[in-house]
Image: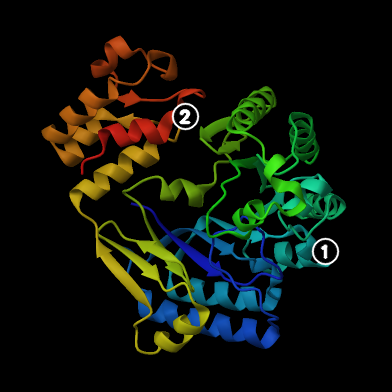
Amino acid sequence: MKNNIYIHFPFCKTRCDYCNFYSQTSKSNYKDYSEYINLLLHEIQLQKNFLTSNNIDNLYLGGGTPSVFNIELIIKLLDYIYKIFNVSSNAEITIEVNPDDITPDYVKELSQNSPINRVSVGIQSFNDIELKSVNRRHTSLQAKKALENINKYFDNFSLDLIYGLPYQTLKSFKDNIDTALLFNPKHISAYALTIEETSPLYKNILANKNNLKLNIPSEEFTIECYHLINNILKDHGFIQYEISNYCIKDYKAKHNSCYWDIDNGYLGLGAGAHSYNGELRQYNIPSLIKYKSNLSNNNYYSQEKITKKMKYNEYIMLKLRTNNGINLNYINKKFGTDFYNNTLAELKNIKPEHLVNNLSTIENNDNIILNTEGLLFADYYASLSFEL
């Protein structure tokens, strides 16, 4: 079992219109950020025994926007984690950054004075019209400058792209991919735009702000984009190891890969963070005010016990989205004969053209793996096997 730590930084200068993660956009300053780091240090003390082991394999600083924090505060936090936990010498330590926060000095200090060895950059698009349509605060030029600076100091960095953005065309998305590849990233995450009903984007569409109703790409368009990026990245030596994630060999995102294995655990720190240790799932309250006020009495989170059925359903849902697929022998040993038989019966409904392996010999295959086309139906196929 591997154990990771995720730290949530719920601060943003502005809020992207599609975002559904917890964050606040008030005018925060160094005092606010320093106070939040101290709250995290306190939570570490409270939760240091949540995981099954004191050994930590990887760390991830996400948000929100961790890069709005002064590097000395980030180092203070990481130093304390290293003091409390036994962090692997091979740990992948990732920080999410926004392009407009990145300066040459910031990246240099990050690489030379902190243990961070991987950067994940929220690019989303290199097209200013597309960026503006979802209230991304950086420009195409800032995105390119940020990648130039990161490239000087970090060999291992990832960037995010979104397809299905308002006003996007197949040509503009191809331009985004081509531009991204100019900077030689080791990892690319590409997500189809999801429009949550609670998001500002959804409200803007209803109000037809800037004629958005006529400029939201269709589902057919997003599928075209999915195949386009698959084909281009494959030609450039990338492996699609999860439906939305691509990497050069040996550069999988170790932290994210931990999430997709139910035998691993992770400790989530900060307002809105989630934790999992194989038996319990824990949800920190998604409110900075309540997180702060309830931390002192250890009443800032809720828990649920993970049942065998829940664990099985998660295994099916997560693994079908990866290039490892689901392992029938594992299901038999971990969950028993009834779960094995259910899996075998339901997954025979998968269309043969959606499988890497041959459906006729499925019982003799250890792994059931969806191909690129099949991954588009991963959630549907997983639902067929769910135990309710």
The secondary structure type at the circle numbered 2 is helix
Q: Quadrant where the C terminus lies?
A: top left
> Which residue is more in the foreground, 83 or 343?
343
Q: Name the residue under label 2.
A: 375
Answer whether residue 117 is visible to the viewer in this image.
no
In the current view of this chain or complex, which residue is farthest to the left? Answer: 337
* x 71%, y 71%: residue: 13
Q: Mark 1 points at which residue?
A: 103
* Quarter where residue 164 is shown: top right
* x 80%, y 34%: residue: 175
Q: CA–CA distance between discs 2 and 1?
A: 38 Å
The secondary structure type at the circle numbered 1 is loop
* x 34%, y 21%: residue: 350
Residue type beneath disc 2: Leu
Answer left or right for 293 relative to 340.
right
Residue 251 x %, y %: 58, 41
